[in-house]
């Protein structure tokens, strides 16, 4: 058995890498890391030990409807942050859906390229 420490990153393809980088910074508060090592590709946007690696979308990548795909990217938050996230999304005009999973509450919304983002809290 391989014992992993946790999720390192999710890699996504974006139509406009700069726009996506700014969105993840402004909406989710992620910070850019590893720019000095990798330059422009990928753009690593992180919080704690979890990152979203943003690559440019190019013609030789499979369409989102073919093969493996990302269903959603989930970020964990405490209750105070979860409640504040809903107020912030409303203020930005970003539509979201609330879901009660019994042991957790989640909100779901989309990034500029249509990836589903989840913020979840286990403080119900």
Image (cartoon, grey):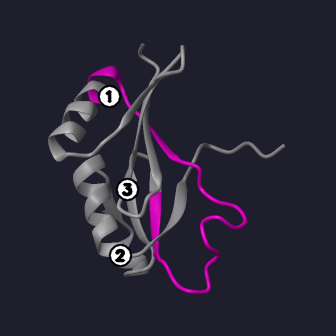
Q: Nearer the viewer, residue 93 or 52?
A: 93
Quadrant assignment for the N terminus: top right
Residue 58: where, in percent of width, then height? 52, 84
Q: Residue at x 64, y 75 (%)?
A: 62
Sequence-first tag of 2 and 3: 2
- Cα separation, mark 1 vs mark 2, equals 28 Å
Q: Residue at x 32, y 28 (%)?
A: 82
Disc 1 is placed on an element classified as: helix
- Cα separation, mark 1 vs mark 3, equals 17 Å
Quadrant assignment for the C terminus: top left
Q: Residue at x 15, y 40 (%)?
A: 91
In the picture, the disc for residue 82 is 1
User: Disc 3 marks which residue?
Assistant: 111
Question: Nearer the viewer's eye, disc 1 or disc 2?
Answer: 2
Give the residue at the far right of this rendering.
1
Residue 102 vs 88, above or below: the answer is above
- Is 111 situated left or right of 62 in this image? left
Question: Nearer the viewer's eye, disc 1 or disc 3?
Answer: 3
In magenta segment, residue 76: yes
The residue segment tinted magenta is 52-81
In the picture, the disc for residue 16 is 2
């Amino acid at each position: 058995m391989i014992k992993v420490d946790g999720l390192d990153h999710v890699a996504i393809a974006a139509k406009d890498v700069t726009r996506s980088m700014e969105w993840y910074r402004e909406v989710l508060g992620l910070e850019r890391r590893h720019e000095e090592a990798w330059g422009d590709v990928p753009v690593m946007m992180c919080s704690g030990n979890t990152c979203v690696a943003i690559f440019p979308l190019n013609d030789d990548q499979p369409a989102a409807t073919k093969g493996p795909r990302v269903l959603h990217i989930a970020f964990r938050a405490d209750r105070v942050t979860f409640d504040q996230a809903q107020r912030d999304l409303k203020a930005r005009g970003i539509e979201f859906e609330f879901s009660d999973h019994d042991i957790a509450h989640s909100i779901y919304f989309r990034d500029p390229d249509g990836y589903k983002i989840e913020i979840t809290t286990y403080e119900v």
